[in-house]
Amino acid sequence: MHVGSIIDGQELKGGNRTTQEVRNPYNGEVVGKIDYVTDGDLDRAIATAERVFHETMRHIPAYQRSAILRKAADLLEARTEEFARTLVVEAGKPIRDARGEVSRAVQVIRFASDEAKTLGGELVPMDAAVGGENRIGMVRHYPVGVVAAITPFNFPLNLVLHKLAPAFAAGNTVVLKPADKTPLSSIALARLFEEAGLPKGALNVVLGRGSKIGEPLVTDPRVAKVSFTGSVPIGLQIRKWAGLKKMTLELGSNSPNLIFDDADLDTAIAGLVRGAFAFSGQACISVQRIYVQSSVYNDFLIKYVKQVKQLHIGDPMLETTDIGPMISEDEAKRAETWVKEAELEGAAVMTGGRRNGTVMEPTVLANVKSNMKVVCQEVFAPIVSVIPFDTEEEAVRMANDSDFGLQAGVFTNNINRALRLADQLVTGGVWINEISTYRQDNHPYGGVKLSGIGKEGVKYAIQDMMESKFIGIKIL
């Protein structure tokens, strides 16, 4: 498969464009080739998105935008296996997880289809202020225009759609820059939207390295909104480039999960195994720090390690595989190095800790310290640290001792404690008796501190992709 960027409905390949191979992270096989955009291609993509927004997209009525999205969801659902296999070969995602991602992506589009028909406004009571008599006030919402969407490798379908579907529901156009390691699903998705009736040029996909495309895309004055999901350093750089543009940044985390002695340990353990090691821990809300009350710590650790050892490592195309590769050998080497550094500083490897090529074994660490990389930084790998605590106050302090604040999980059967912690944990979201990794695609999702700014979750992303205008009428 040899593909190029899609601009104004045309696929651009050949000429003086650089060709790059896309490789299967598990076995290194070449699964496709892509041609990167030139500077001229990128300028054309932005110009096309701006033109189509003004000429077409902003004038499409809500019911038609909704219908386009509904058809796109139906087409994607019918092609679940095709897209799932693409995710396996380009991202190394185990096939069962890949099917789950496609299913969620379908749901995201359907949420957006529903929301497209609800984008009204509100009346403002003008007579609430002295002198406001005989006046009517209203607020209406309008699409911002061109949205620059920059997406990561770890959910190359669903996280792309968390940007595309809300943008189209609102009436915007998009220039999408997918991760250079996982571009194939984005090209297939662009063709699917075209088949669903999205106007040509409403979605333009530009392929290339972020270091080459990022700055000119983000700084271009024709781009009204930037939505980025990725690392903290790049997110901070994008914020500097973007200036006063509307912006959503979904960045890193090192998610804490707090287990109290009154919790259902078996339920918690099953979720925390899944939440730490799904897709080799390569999710920003993956379980990374598990704080367990001292009275049940040993019991928890024994049971947890036992279940982790039962995970099956292997070819991600096999139905039985739980743990596949990381996205690259460099990332797997980094994860292995962090574990070795932690060991040298006194951490105990309870299971795992070894690497074979791009595959990192699911790893559980104990006796860790708060300043170790595996604890205080975002590990983004199948590595979890289990840490004891005595009191509720201590657990909250350790959980909040982080530069990040995306989502947290709390396991307790004490409703008063649950509500206290929901208030006290400094994160964008708190789950009670559920792992930090759980995300439903219609709830507001976004962090505080270095975890980012703005919210995703279809309804909330749409709000950030529109401008509000006040309209006042004086009755004569």
Image: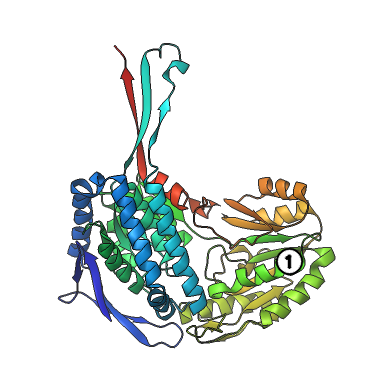
**Residue 430: horizontal and vertical position, in percent?**
63, 53
Q: Quadrant of the C terminus?
A: top left
- Check disc 1 and give the amino acid type: Ile
Left or right, residue 421 beside residue 249: right
Residue 222 in percent (x, y) is at 24, 49
Residue 111 in view, yes or no? yes
Who is closer to the viewer here, 264 or 215?
A: 264
Q: Classify residue 469 by image quadrant.
A: top left
47 relative position to 180: left or right: left
Q: Is residue 27 left or right of residue 33?
A: right
CA neighbours of label 1 inside 10 A, class few (<14), some (14 to 19), many (20+): many
Whether residue 94 appears in this view of the structure is: no
Outermost right residue: 295
Residue 284 lies left or right of residue 235; in this view the side is: right
Disc 1 on helix, strand or loop?
A: strand
Query: Which residue is painted at 70% across and 78% down in the image?
Result: 307
Q: Position of residue 451 (x, y in %)?
A: 52, 55
Q: Which residue is situated farthest in the left direction here?
A: 15
- Residue 156 quadrant: bottom left
**For the point 52% across and 52% down, which residue is it?**
443
Q: Look at the image and name its color scheme.
A: rainbow
Total label count? 1
> Quadrant where the N terminus lies?
bottom left
For this rendering, which residue is in front, 303 or 18?
A: 303
- 338 or 301: nearer the eye? 301
Q: Quadrant of residue 117?
A: top left
Q: Is residue 55 above or below residue 193?
A: above
Mark 1 lies on residue: 387
Q: Position of residue 162 (x, y in %)?
A: 42, 58
Residue appearing at x 25%, y 45% in the figure: 58
